[in-house]
Image (cartoon, rainbow, N blue to C red):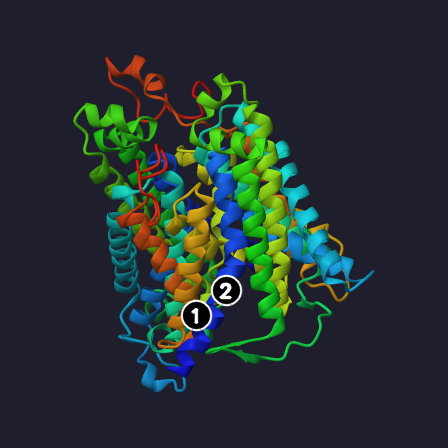
Amino acid sequence: MHGFFVALGFGLVTAAILAFSAVAFSLQYGVSNHPNFAHGELLTVGAYAAYVSQSLTTNLLVGGLAAAAAGGLVAWGMNRGIVEPFVRARARSLVIFIATIGVAIIIQNVLLAVFTGTNVVYVLPQAVPHRVGPFLWTSRDELIMAAAAGTMALLHLLLRYTKFGKALRAVADSRDLARVSGIDASRVIQLTWGLAGLIAGLGGFVLAGRVGSFAPSFGFNFLLVTFAAAIVGGIGKPYGAMAGALLVGVAMETSAFYVAADYKLPIAFALLIATLLVRPEGLFTTRPRVGGGAA
Amino acid sequence: MINYLVSIATQGVIFAIFVLGLNVRWGWEGDLDIAYYAFIAIGAYIDAVLTLPPAGLRPPTEYILGLRWPFVAGALGAMLAGGLLSLVVGAIALRKLRGDYFAITTLATALIMQAVISNDARIFAGYNGLYGLSQPFNSVLRLDPHVYPVFYLAFCLAVLIAVYLFLERLFWSPFGRALRSVREDETAAAAFGRNVFALKLKGYVIGGVIAGLGGALFVHFLGAFNVSAWSPVETLLLYAAIFVGGTGNNRGVILGIFLVLIFFQEVTRFLPEIPGHPDFGPAVREILIGILILAVLRWRPQGILPEPRAQDRDPASAAGYAAGSAVAGTRAGG
């Protein structure tokens, strides 16, 4: 049983990291209605921005801010520069999806051309595992979980109690109804891309800090796990994505206790496929979202 | 120099077969399959294990079968494997999922397959990959090593022409028209009594069979095959060719793959070599693929040779028509 709890503890850390990525993806998809295949690159950009900031200072807060700012900026630009022109040209939604695949490849390879494919590492304080109840965590793990909880709480306050949050939820529910109520939907969509980028960039920093070293393809490798958590939680539902992250993260790490660790990712993908087939609206939604499920 | 050109040309011809299969899926059917390369890979693997000698003779590699079948049987096995895999994936994913979820599912499926193949080395030798493939027909022909590549190029070209002619017939057949009507508007097609799922599944399987055939030709061209070759970028290159050449148009996508391959062959020649940075050239190549895809989709989504429309051909239909003559290269579509 002891080993199981250690694995469960790892699962909670993975879930915390996954929450950043999945919530950001779900938020952006829910509001703009276009899945962003270049979402993984927002994590990568965040991770590299923090890496660059470390040449000035190894302060973790600065690293986190640099990562979030870079992610937010790139996401905002991606929408303005690529997605919006395609939407204006009335491109089919699958064509826009392919365009984001193109963007993913471009960003990944620009990073490859600039930083080379060599793995890079952060300068981080020593992380010694210690027991917390039945779990085995390092202080870094605890920091990651605290950061995730803090970010999710802030996001909750933003969505619930600010005017922007209200507008965002309105646009996600129905863009047309939001427009006729006087909400500037395209501005809300732009800001949501930026917000999602902030969270994803920070998620990239946290993920890179956890795995230790990273290369230009690292965010892309995390993309399908993100899809899995976001879809299991129900696309466009930030709270569902948090629950999905918890489920997928814990399932991945505890399964590694029973089967070979190499099957961690396939287990997340199998969850993804199973959810799409059985309950495409997500496990944690009470009513199917209009247009959000299978066609 | 000649060897080099023959090798490039053979690769182009094989890629043209790949792209024709993908064009059925994306161009005709409208289903975005980002894991098409997995079907090529499965064809390559199955052909390899059917034609290679038993694994027991070549320790320490391990793989299934090892039947020493002739190439033609191996290629048929590859087509069957590509078709069966398509049937399974398609039956699951095409029934329920709308476009973007379908695309994500194909990618997840491919990554699961990749994980299984790399971790369970007993099936296809895992990361070691399969190597030492025979030269098709050469046990009978016994050609000179300088002449054989030319023969193989001619053979691949013959296969390409056969696949092309088959698909051209299919394009104008009732099945082809019905499939494209599903792409344009599923609801309308269903209202006219079309079984949308069955049509899409058939198209998907045809694409998979062609991918398997291409995979068989490819693995004998390369002489070896490895799971690390499964890069999503290769699928993206095929998409770039389809967009450039003309989505849905058989002739267009063949033109597209040759243009794209020649373009990258030429461009990479002028790239500076940066010492200690071996990834620079490949990175620039992939950036260019990305930019090319974005630019074509944005400014000429129909490609160089747009898909021929029914009316391009209809004026002649009352009086019968000269085969294909009214079809080629019309720019009326879009």
Q: Which chain carries label 1?
A: A
Q: In which quarter of the image is residue A260?
A: bottom left
Mark 1 vs mark 2, CA separation in Å:
8 Å
Identify the image quadrant of the N terminus of chain A: bottom left
Question: Is residue A171 shown to the viewer in this render?
Answer: yes
A280 shown above or below B220: above
Q: Name the residue under label 1.
A: A253
Left or right, A118 with reference to A285: right
Left or right, A78 with reference to B198: right
Q: Which residue lies at the image location 62% right of the left edge and 63% below the top edge? A: A208
Q: Which residue lies at the image location 34% right of the left edge and 44% below the top edge? A: A285
A21 shown above or below B320: below
B295 shown above or below B201: above
Q: Which residue lies at the image location 71% right of the left edge and 67% below the top edge? A: A122
Q: Where is residue B1 in the image (x, y as percent from the top left)?
A: 62, 58
Identify the image quadrant of the C terminus of chain A: top left
Q: Name the residue under label 2.
A: A14
Which mark is drawn over residue A87? none
Q: Along the polypeptide, which appears first: circle 1 or circle 2? A: 2
Q: Which amino acid does label 1 sit on?
A: Glu
For this rendering, which residue is in front, B228 or A247? A247
Instruction: State if disc 2 and disc 1 touch (CB < 8 Å).
Output: yes
Q: What element carries label 1?
A: helix
Question: Is residue B134 shown to the viewer in this render?
Answer: no
